[in-house]
Image (cartoon, rainbow, N blue to C red):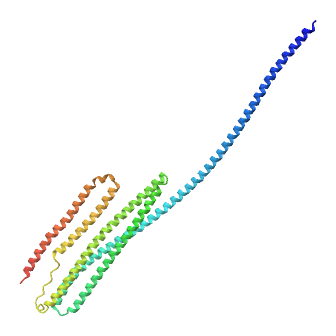
Amino acid sequence: MSSPPLNLQVCAGLSSRLQEYKSENAQLEELLVQEEDMDGLKRNRELTETRVIQALREELATAERRAEEERIAHNATKMAAVEREVELEHRAVEASNALARIQRAADQSSSRAMELEHKVAVLEVECGSLQQELQEMEARNRRAQKRPSEEANQVLQMQAWQEEVERARQSQREAETKISSLEAELQKMRVEMAGMKRDAEHYSRQEHVELEKRYRELTDLLYHKQTQLESMASEKAALEFQLEKSLRQFHEVQIEAERSRASRRSASSWEEDTDIKALEPLPLHHRHMATANQQLQKAAKLLDSGAVRATRFLWRHPVARVSQPVILSGVCSFVLDAFAEPSSGLCVKGNGAVRDGGSGQRAKLP
């Protein structure tokens, strides 16, 4: 009677344990599934991390390669910049040497111009002495009968004068050739300096400032040389003017000598026994003409130097260009005054000389 309830209790206990085991088994299965899911997630994460690390390593290698390439390119650029700087320094040295050569050529040209001016002065003195000798020769020819030998001496003197004039012309041509060569060298230097300025724009600011400073120095020196060249050109023009004046005087002396020979041949029959009257010197207006020419030359040189200084000032100070019309009007008035004063003085003196010469000739008439 007591066994069935015991069995029921055992069955109930076993069923409860079975339920517990089932619940534990279900929990274990859930834990196993979760663990498998966690393992899958862990594997996926490891794969993702491996891929990310591989990508990062590839990016790092690429960045290192790029950095190496940029470093190599930077070194190459730096070396090219150093080589370019050395080349620019060589060019600057060559430009300074060229400027030194131009300076020497300018000094030689200036010394040559001074020699030509001295020769022109000597020619003027010789022209005066030739005029005096011509007067003395005419007086001696009228007193004596040695006309052929004296005429031969006079012809020799005329030939020597012509040779001197030829030498002066040759010197003038040489000076023109030197001036043209100097202008060509100046143009070449301008081209080189323009190239240096274009090359200097590709460098850093400090190098650009240094090269700009050198460029300004070279530009100032070039402007100074150009000023010297313009002054030499003005001196050459003055020398040409003096040479033309000497040639005119030479032709006048030659014509006067021919006239004196003709008059001496025609009047030698009855003038041998008469008193010989000394020939009159050149008219007074010729001497005033020479003085006026010197004043004009001085005025031309002064105008050239003033124009050069004004150009330099306007080049360095652009604001001052506003007053350029006033400066030009002042220069024009100065030129008009410079040309008006010598011409008026020349006219007055020339009229006085003509009146004096006419009165003197009337007084000498018997």
- Can residue 9 be seen? yes
Is residue 194 shown above or below 105? above
Task: Residue at 49%, 63% (x, y): give it.
Answer: 90
Q: Across the whole image, how many numbered discs are drawn on residues?
A: 0
Residue found at the far left of this picture: 366
Can you give x and y, in whole percent of width and height, for residue 92 in the image? 46, 62
Residue 332 relative to residue 311: left or right = left
Q: Quadrant of residue 111?
A: bottom left
Give the residue displayed 49% in from the left and 52% down from the top: 204
Q: Residue at x 23, y 60 (%)?
A: 332
Question: In the figure, 19 relative to 324: above or below?
Answer: above
User: x, y percentage for residue 20?
Assistant: 82, 18
Residue at position x 31%, y 61% in the image? 308
Q: Is residue 124 visible?
A: no
Quick one: quadrant of the N terminus?
Answer: top right
Quadrant containing the C terminus is bottom left
Q: Position of residue 47 (x, y in %)?
A: 72, 38
Q: Position of residue 3 (x, y in %)?
A: 93, 9
Q: Is residue 29 left or right of residue 234?
A: right
Q: Is residue 120 left or right of residue 208?
A: left
Q: Is residue 168 above or below residue 6?
A: below
The residue most toward the top is 1
Q: Quadrant of residue 23?
A: top right
